[in-house]
Amino acid sequence: MSSMDSEVKKIHSSKKTSTYHTKKSDRKRRRDKSRSHSPSSDCEYSYKKRSKHRSSNKSHYYDDNKTSKRKNNDCYWTKYPRKDNSYIGRRYYDDDLPCGGGRENFSKARDSEKKAEDMVLKPRERKVTDMITSRTGGAYIPSAKLRMMQAEITEKTSVAFQRLAWEALKKSIHGYINKVNISNIGIIARELLKENIIRGRGLLCKSIIQAQAASPTFTNVYAALVAVINCKFPNIGELLLKRLVLQLKRGFKQNNKMICISASTFVAHLVNQNVVHEILALEILTLLIETPTDDSIEVAIAFLKECGQKLSEVSSRGINAIFEMLRNILHEGKLEKRIQYMIDVIYQIRKDGFKDHAAIIAELDIIEEDDQFTHLIKLDDVKQAETEDILNVFKFDNNYELNEGKYKILSNEILQTDSEGESGSGSESGSEEEKDSEEEGEEGQKESGTIIDNTETNLIALRRTIYLTIQSSLDFEECAHKLLKMELKPSQEIELCHMFLDCCAEQRTYEKFYGLLSQRFCQINNIYVESFQQIFKDTYATTHRLDANRLRNVSKFFAHLLFTDAIGWEILDTMKMNEEETNSSSRIFIKILFQELAEFMGLEKLNQRLKDPTLQAHFTGLFPRDSPKNIRFSINFFTSIGLGGLTDELREYLKNLPKKCFFSNV
């Protein structure tokens, strides 16, 4: 029993000893492993292997571009940069190299690791863009930096200087447009005129259109600003109008209601400011209502609210036709209830006289009627090329300094004229004594002699008024009624007659409107008869200056006045039908004139009129009997134009002419 117990104790003691030694060896192994594999706090890389050679405390020195070989043939040292600009050494063994041992393989491994390290530690280079050569609308340049960059460039003819000047011009134009309101519109207009808005007219138009689209409630303010600029530079106003019309047409084609409302609202306020003629407003309304949809009627009603009062004053018949079309659309009942309600509302607004939608408020009625310049732009005539989008971008100018100097002189003249006008208006509100002295001075001038206006400013304003009245009338009766209310001064009647003829000549084809209008004035007063007869003689003498289209329109115009007996047939004595006193233009004039007379009167009545004994003396030039050569020329001319029946008597006269006289004149 005791022997068995001793055996058991031996077994247990042997187990305990082996377990203890096993655990102790494991602990030591784990401790050594953790020591050998623990990463250093100062090192960027961890070692893959440790060796007993690592325990050496000897210090080593390395060259930056070289590696040194240790005593052991399988160990190599190298150094790597750390993030804090210090270096860390690393020791390699042949077993660590992926390609095996040796100096060559070690160099390859080291180079590959250096490349990987450079890719990781090398900072990414930022792309530097030159703001001067970058595209327009790119990087924002602060004002201080822009001035500094401009000061650094001394050569004003260089591209860099002009581009910086262009950026400065764009920045100032945008700044002024964003600042404008009712109270400071005069100040902003003067500041804009100081800038070269002729060079930057594309920028100005673009900025105004964008500002108006962003804040539609200020549309009347922007329209007033455009009116001020337009009276000084009409080409800028025309450019802005063409861009607006094209934007409206594009929005209408794309069914974009917001663009249509924005552009049409701006056009409506420009109509109110007399920048554009009301014909464009009527064309826009006709386009929107002609093929009615919910959106188009909504845009038309918004347009009518803005310029309905103005259209009621200048073209009552036109706006009546528009409202009649709206009534028919309302009775059809094909639109939404909301749109039908809007039509009812616009009728109520019209009944109230547009009192809540005034055309121009008093604060924005800036431009006097004589200074206004109204453009006649039609909806179908505007094309993409006419908007001149190239003006929005920078373009190098070879004569930059010269053009800048010219604009500076022009700007100073405009601003000085405005300041003198303001001081003059202020002096008019002076005391009564000053007014009396002015009146005495005027009387003294009248006694000394009359003042002649060689600039013809009044004449130009008169012709402009007549032209706009003609264009805004629906028929000749309305036009005659408007023109008779003008109360023309003596000697201005002939200007009215000249305007009738010029407007008729400018048309693509002859319009009977001008003939009927001239006929009405001739029937009202004999002064106009004498004026038209004088104009006929002057026109026939200068037919060589007219092109084919004008020649045709003028001939038909006078033919109408002749066959209606608005003017006398005595004026035909200026025509001499022979080879010496006619040219190609005068012969075309006579041809179209007599063909029109024969068409309206008939050949028989025309022949009777030409045989009238009281008028025979005035037709001797057309049907000469002085020489056989001229007789034959007249006969051949009228026969070639299909009116040979007018020369029957002339043929008989030529046949019965004595042979002696005949041969003597051949």
Image: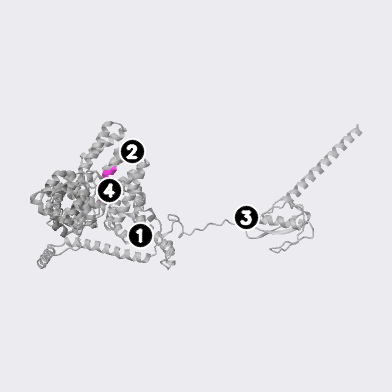
> Position of 545 compared to 196: left or right?
left
Q: In the drawing, what numbered circle is on residue 295?
A: 2
Residue at mark 3? 119
Residue 355 appears at what percent x and percent y? 22, 43
Please state the extent of the stretch shown in magenta in the rendering: 271-284
* Image quadrant where residue 543 sits: bottom left
Question: At x 26% / y 64%, what residue is drawn?
Answer: 416
> Is the residue 313 above or below the residue 411 in the image?
above
State the separation of the CA atoms marked 1 and 4: 26 Å
The numbered mark, 3 or 1, whose residue comes first in the sequence reads 3
Residue at mark 1? 199
In depth, the one of 521 and 645 nearer the eye is: 645
The numbered mark, 2 or 1, whose residue comes first in the sequence reads 1
Say which quadrant the N terminus sits in: top right
Question: At x 33% / y 45%, what residue is drawn?
Answer: 262
> Is residue 485 magenta-colored?
no
Residue at mark 4? 269
State the separation of the CA atoms marked 2 and 4: 21 Å
Residue 512 appears at what percent x and percent y? 20, 45
Question: At x 29% / y 64%, what residue is drawn?
Answer: 412
Query: Total number of numbered labels?
Result: 4
Q: Is residue 466 visible?
A: no
Q: Amino acid at mark 2?
A: Asp
The local crowd at label 1, few if under 14, some if 14 to 19, many if 20 or more residues have their Cα within 10 Å, is many
